[in-house]
Amino acid sequence: MWAFLAVLVAALLGWVLVSVQTSGSGGTPDPAPAPSAVAQQETLLIQARNDADLGVDNMVAGVGGGLPAAQLLIPSRLIVDVPGAGQQTLGASARLLDRSASQDALSDLLALRIDGTLSLGRLALAGMVDYVGGITVDVDQPIMEVDEETGLETVVVPSGTQTLDGTQAATYALTWLPDEPEAARLARYSQVMTATISGLPDDALRIEQMLTSLGGSARTTTASATVAQFLLQMRQSILDGGQQARVLPTTDIEAGEALPVVRADLVAAEAVIDSLLPQAVLTGAESNPRVLVQNGVGTPGLGASARDRLVGSGMVYINGGNADQFDQDQTLVIVADATTESVTLGESVAEALGVPPTSVQISEDGQNVADVVVILGADFEP
């Protein structure tokens, strides 16, 4: 009875691709085109926040493009560079006022197109589960709660096959058990989201109404109707035969006695992303040059403004942080060589940033950290 979770955890910890099979009849097909007929793979960051407003459970879900639904599960302890807010964990980025902070940081780190974010507080996650009438899951290890005053433990979710209401399901997904690998918690989160999404109605309008009813505990960076259509497509893909789930490969960074944070293993991550979300990859296309941006003035928010313009022009932004000095008068757009192709690309970057083409400079030593390196100067207007 514990087979589902045991298999999923083992697969996630070993970076082995799994297929989550969900039984059930899809009913009579709608006369409208099936969600799987979407021409391009779409993506949505689905985030669950705990009571401290940290994004403890994160997945970049993908649907469409003729591919099965995909879940790229991402540890909350992952170090990211947040445009305008600096380096922090992905979980902490969920606390920022900018609702796109987690989405943008992941997109920049992984060179991955993320079309929107659905961020769910505990109440919103519980509300979704209650909306579908609860979910049935195989619980490998009981979830306990400790009373802070008495120190007494209470079993909130018993082990075995259980039908969970919203409150139990949220606790099951958000709790991090002692000495537990984060991949195991992400496996529970995957279980909860898979069961909940597959239980949604086959009606985008009703899903949109459900999202609206969740109130302020549910945050989106795009229209609720767009999120509803995405969830409807994901639901159909699950019912049609499964989905692929992987954890983002990472490496630990030891930090004394504290819980270690992790960095993305970008080489291994590239292979995982190519297998799950191939149509959302930004790296490698000629139309998506990678531009590393440094703040050469020190004014807060310059990097975020530059990012918006570059991404809006179809480029991949890389957060280069602060330059060595804050005395840059003129923005520099540095290209690798004097070829027509490189100079033209530099001029395109300068145009996107709103600085003159005279900003384009040829690197004296060459560079391979990005296609273009930008050092923002005082002439750059946010």
Image: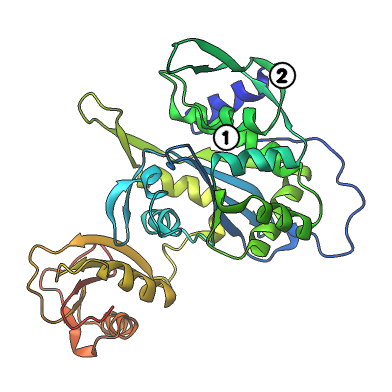
Check disc 1 and report the residue beneath it.
189
* Outermost front residue: 149
Taking 273 as reference, is 233 left or right? Answer: right
* Outermost right residue: 28
Residue 118 against residue 335 in the figure, above or below: above
Check disc 2 and report the residue beneath it.
161
The numbered disc on residue 124 is none
Q: Is residue 141 visible?
A: no
Query: Residue visible at 14% across and 70% down?
Result: 296
| Residue 292 falls in image quadrant | bottom left
Taking 272 as reference, is 323 left or right? Answer: left
* Label whose residue precedes the other's in the sequence (2 or 1): 2
Residue 261 against residue 209 in the figure, above or below: above
Q: Secondary structure at mark 1?
A: helix
- List x then y, in percent, for residue 281: 48, 59
Q: Nearer the viewer, residue 73 or 382?
A: 382
Q: Quadrant of the N terminus?
A: top right
- Using a 10 Å C-alpha cutoff, classify the residue at mark 2 as few (fewer than 14 neighbours), some (14 to 19) or many (20 or more): few
Q: Amino acid at mark 1?
A: Tyr
CA distance for labels 2 and 1: 16 Å
Q: Quadrant of the C terminus?
A: bottom left
Q: Is residue 306 visible?
A: yes
Colouring scheme, one of rainbow, by chain, secondary structure, one colour: rainbow
- List x then y, in percent, for residue 56: 46, 38
Residue 344 against residue 8 in the figure, above or below: below
Taking 304 as reference, is 91 left or right? Answer: right
- List x then y, in percent, for residue 215: 61, 52
Q: Nearer the viewer, residue 17 or 378?
A: 378
Q: Amino acid at mark 2?
A: Thr
Q: How many marks?
A: 2
Q: Nearer the viewer, residue 224 or 214?
A: 214
Q: Secondary structure at mark 2?
A: strand
